[in-house]
Image: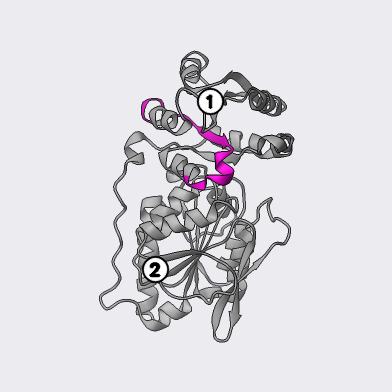
Amino acid sequence: MPIKVLIVDDSALMRALLTEIINGAPDLEVVGAAPDPVAAREMIKTLNPDVLTLDVEMPRMNGLEFLDRLMRLRPMPVIMISSFTAAGSDVTLKALELGAVDYLAKPRAENISMLQGYAEDIRDKIRAASGAHLKSASRIAVPPAPTFAQPKGGFSPRLLAERVIAIGASTGGTEAIKEVLGSLPGEIPPIVMVQHMPESFTPSFAQRLNSLSKLTVIEAQGGERLQPGMAYLAPGHSHMRVRKSGGGLVLELSREEPVNRHRPAVDVLFRSVAEQVGKSAIGVILTGMGKDGARGLLAMRQAGAWNIGQDQASCVVYGMPREAAEIGALDEVASLADIAGSIMAKLRALDKRGTGG
């Protein structure tokens, strides 16, 4: 049976274009196209779609208001497709907080033909969304995660200086990273992160993480020397690597070709951590579509790093962690709620052993 898709967009041209793209795949079928959320509400009842694509700015009710009601009354996989996702990253991050599975930027009206080039991406996102693990309404309003305490007296200066935590995520990762970082204390080895995300989103996402975490979170600019208590997010336009320099580690950015169809790519970061940090690293792979990060994480484990992956039950899309588990890249698998605690337990154990690895 094909995956049934309902399009909600006030633009007749966009509805027609999305219909053509989606129906171009034999395993996908557009069962309806609504010009506004009020019409969509009735179509959902009668057509019972598997996935909804949703614009933000529409007449009669905006997309965020509709999404909020939908996820509370009839949760279903939603992909945001809107001009707001290109310029209004805060709106998209809010949609993800409300329970949207994924997002895709709509080109501006004068470049609308560019959407044809997104066809493969749109179809892949719909396929992944159809099997996504949705937040319940109770989880959407979940209270802040607990912060795991540092050891009495804090971690040793040696551990803070030598260790690096590397995190990779994709679909569902904005909320997963937020939960992990929000549960960690402020005094911790430096964290380097890749979240698949457009370049217009990463500054806002870094600011959002910084406001919710005891860590100082920034979007990497390149050239930063890694410092304890800091988390560095790869910008949406560049691959990010770590490199040894002057007894420490610095960040390098490059606009080389995408890897695994992504730039930044998790594999690029993880491979650099394997080469430059080796057994002093901790690798974390979170929810996400595809395979990016799995091979790099395996290289980290082969270099002596300790790695943890998110379990299937807590993933929005169990793709990247599944691939990492299948190729033997993980030392531990844990639910999202337990990952920060496992990281802290590993760091405490390493500190007791004199950071011997």
Q: Nearer the viewer, residue 293 or 173?
A: 173
For the residues carrying marks 1 and 2, which lies nearer the camera in this image?
A: 1
- Binning the other alpha carbons within 10 Å of mark 2 as few (below 14), some (14 to 19) or many (20 upward) gives some
Mark 1: secondary structure: loop
Amino acid found under the numbered disc labelled 1: Asp
Residue 185 at what x, y percent from top left? 34, 66
Q: Which mark is residue 346?
A: 2
Magenta range = 72-90
- Binning the other alpha carbons within 10 Å of mark 1 as few (below 14), some (14 to 19) or many (20 upward) gives many
Q: Nearer the viewer, residue 214 or 268?
A: 214
Residue 132 at what x, y percent from top left? 50, 37
Q: Can residue 193 be seen by looking at this rendering?
A: yes
Mark 2: secondary structure: helix
Amino acid found under the numbered disc labelled 2: Lys
The residue singled out by tag 1 in the image is: 50
Q: Can residue 333 be seen by looking at this rendering?
A: no
Task: Please name the residue shown 49% across and 13% down the image.
Answer: 46
Q: Nearer the viewer, residue 154 or 352?
A: 154
Residue 244 at what x, y percent from top left? 59, 80
Looking at the rendered structure, the number of numbered marks drawn on it comes to: 2
Q: Which mark is residue 109?
A: none
